[in-house]
Amino acid sequence: MKKYLKLLVLIAGIVIFLNSVGFSNEVTQSPNAGEMILVKAGTFMMGNTRDDSEGESDEKPVHEVELTYDYEIGKYEVTNAEFIEFLNDAGVSSVGKLNGHRVINMYDIYCEFEKIDGTFKLNPEGKNNYPVIHVTWWGTMEYCNWLSFQEDLAKAYDIDGNLLDSNGNETTDITKVEGYRLPTEAEWEYAARGAENDINTKTDYKFAGSNDMNLVGWYLDNSENNEYPIYSGRGTHHIGQKEPNEIGLYDMSGNAYEWCLDWYTSDYYIKSPRKNPVNLESSFSRILRGGGLATDDEYCRVSNHGKTLPTDSGYYLGFRIARKAD
């Protein structure tokens, strides 16, 4: 009994000591950046379902989409810490290239990576759990293929960015792709809407999880960052600091704009297939979703889609990953 009491006293002493040096019961650990959220198959109405006045013409017509498969999507945007592991392990060159693709723009004055003595480092160092930015569409592709290799999955892309099935053959059927990839635009919007058909309901939110952008994301009006400013005193923020949406996804609206798998064509909603749509019709630009630190809130709406060249990078461009569920 005495030994037991001594053990309790010892444990209590350790707890008091840890609290005294800052290790309290409060949540101080970083989120599990690589965590995925399961999204069940379902049907929803895609596009400007709320008829928002600031909606753009390419957000219509509102149309029914059925996703016939379960998939996983990143709970958070991919972080600097995750991406720098890829940069160093995959052999990305000092100018930010891999397999002939520019992964990141090392010449951008806002770039947060530097290569010193053959090793990529983050500068400033304190942004490990901030969303990675300055990533091209090609950089997301190379990251996803690298991550698939780490987990013994068939890679999702060939060197030209075409989709591959689990046997390594080119495919246009998203359900045949095994490895990590970007979410399709339809997958992104369905997940942002809380994985439900929310049209004409109270949860048909303007942004991912709320009608109040300040609750769920960082954008032009609230992204001031005195510690790590990027642009005009504004910056990205540590992942997972705002409220999640209905299925537990963070920063779907705001923080960093997110690359999607699809090409952009202005008339795609008119001709989009009902089941498992993904726009593989080659054009000039790839889809961006969610808005970011330097955009007005209208670009953070769940129905809004931006676009830019796949070779572009910048202080506002990041991504999250997805894959078909096992």
Image (spheres, rainbow, N blue to C red):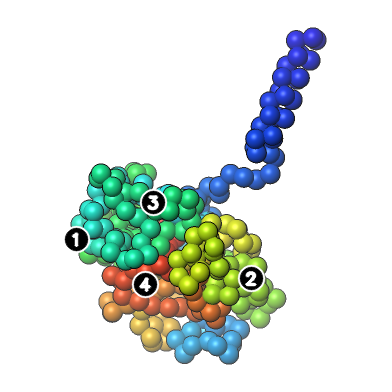
Q: Residue at x 73, y 16 (%)?
A: 7
Q: Amino acid at mark 1?
A: Gly
Spatial CA distance of label 4 from label 1 is 21 Å
Q: Earlier in the sequence, mark 2 or mark 1?
A: 1
Residue to which mark 2 is pinned: 214
Q: Nearer the viewer, mark 2 or mark 1?
A: 2
Location of residue 104 (image quadrant)? bottom left
Q: Is residue 106 visible?
A: yes
Question: Residue 41 in the image: x percent, y percent?
Answer: 52, 63
Q: Residue at x 72, y 30 (%)?
A: 16
Q: Amino acid at mark 4?
A: Asp
Task: Tell me if label 2 and label 4 are in contact, CB under 8 Å.
Answer: no
Spatial CA distance of label 2 from label 3 is 28 Å
239 relative to 91, above or below: below
Q: Amino acid at mark 3?
A: Leu
Residue to which mark 1 is pinned: 100
Residue to which mark 4 is pinned: 262
Q: Is residue 189 visible?
A: no
